[in-house]
Image (tube, rainbow, N blue to C red):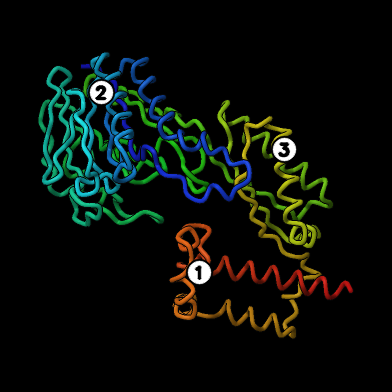
Amino acid sequence: MNFTFIHAADIHLDSPLKGLSRYEGAPVEKLRSATRDAFKNMIDFAIKEKVHFIIIAGDLYDGDWKDYNTGLFFANEMARLKMHQIPVYMIKGNHDAASIITKEIKLPDNVYIFDDKKCKSMFIDELGVALHGQGFSTRAVTDNLAKSYPQKEDGYFNIGILHTSAVGREGHENYAPCSIEDMKGKEYDYWALGHIHKREFLCEKNPVILFPGNIQSRHSKETGPKGCSLIKVSDGQIQELNHISLDVLRWEIIEIDATPLGDYDQFLQKIEEQLENYLDTADGRMLAARVVVSGNTSLYQELMKNKEKVLNDIRSAAFAVGHGQIWIEKIKNKTAPPLESNHFSDENNPVTSIFNWLEKSDMDELLEDVRKEFSAITNVLPTDLKRGENMVIPDSVAMLEEKLEEVKQLVSLELQMEGGK
């Protein structure tokens, strides 16, 4: 039997936008509707391609709904699929676990949700497909769910649906951990995974084990094309497996090495070139970009002293290139003075000694000391300054190192300015 299906995950419908009000010119409405628009794109594509079914491997929602509109939107899109006789098979992930979603809306009967207490199997006999899955009953599932999945059903194309961190991924909670061997041992033909937002094959054949990634990136850490996977099966074998881009706004990090750039005009020209390149690859989508500037450069002092001018010059360049299709989210300056004028290259400089000591310190111990020292301040900070990239007090070694680098830049700038007097 020949059939085609879509594998999607981590849709996060109506994911809330945090802290965007402080960003000048942020396309708030575009960002607010992005997850819905990307989901509509998937439904439109499914209808156009006449797929036989859709799999959603967890995190359809982003937590409990603030009202019923999120559920009503999903129900309406499912009704569109029902008109074309396209069923949807889904499991709940950590963001839409049974214990989290307190509101309910009756869904069309083409939507099948797997049990969250134990693994169940569903069969599409006319296609010869057996689907096996189990959702999350609570947000933090730390058991190896894959072990409880049944062995393959003979005579069927077997698909396992699982929301999991697998063997673990940086930046993702270690939920429903399992090994590739655990999944291979079930002898399925395909494992439809969810939870990791970056598209990744854990195994490319016998069986295919795939994270399709989320369908719409929501911040600068989720860059590049986002969407679902389209799988075509013929005579029990996967013949084609393609990524389908669904995103309506694409996030990218634009990295500029300022080391070889001789003056500020060259710097702006380099940024314009990079913006043009990324806009071309966005295929007509709006581009949200973070610009990261690094390198030992003579532009260091100008970039540090005139931050507001630099930001607005880059925004102006973005408008010239994209005519409103590019939004500059943030500029991160990681530059340093030229090596010959770098104050931290002088071992006899007392400031150098301090930073050398910091670099040799145990960062975990230093982080704990910082937390204790500033605990009273942390308690009275606004919520948006306690988490995410706007966090004032570091909560990880990586963030502490980044803060120390910023301090080093500011001290170096002051020393340069003192030397120029």
Q: Are marks 1 and 3 in contact (CB under 8 Å)?
A: no
> Horizontally, is 80 left or right of 355 in the view?
left
Look at the image and tell me in which quarter the C terminus lies: bottom right
Residues under labels 3 and 2: Cα distance? Answer: 42 Å
Q: Residues within 10 Å of mark 3 (few under 14, many from 20)?
A: few
Residue that badge 3 annotates: 273
Percent position (x, y) of residue 288?
Answer: 58, 40
In the displayed structure, 128 sits above or below 204; it is: above
Q: Amino acid at mark 2?
A: Phe
Report helix, strand or loop for mark 2: strand
Q: Amino acid at mark 3?
A: Glu
Residue that badge 2 annotates: 53
For this rendering, which residue is in front, 42 or 274? 42
Q: Residues within 10 Å of mark 2 (few under 14, many from 20)?
A: some
Give the residue drawn at x 67%, y 71%: 408
> Horizontally, is 173 left or right of 115 in the view?
right
Which of the 4 image quadrants contains residue 245?
Answer: top left
Residue that badge 1 annotates: 393
Q: Considering only order in the chain, which callout, 2 or 1, is on the residue closer to the N terminus?
A: 2
In the displayed structure, 279 sits above or below 390; it is: above
Residues under labels 1 and 3: Cα distance? Answer: 36 Å
> Horizontally, is 190 left or right of 120 in the view?
right
Mark in front: 1 vs 2: 1
Residues under labels 1 and 2: Cα distance? Answer: 47 Å
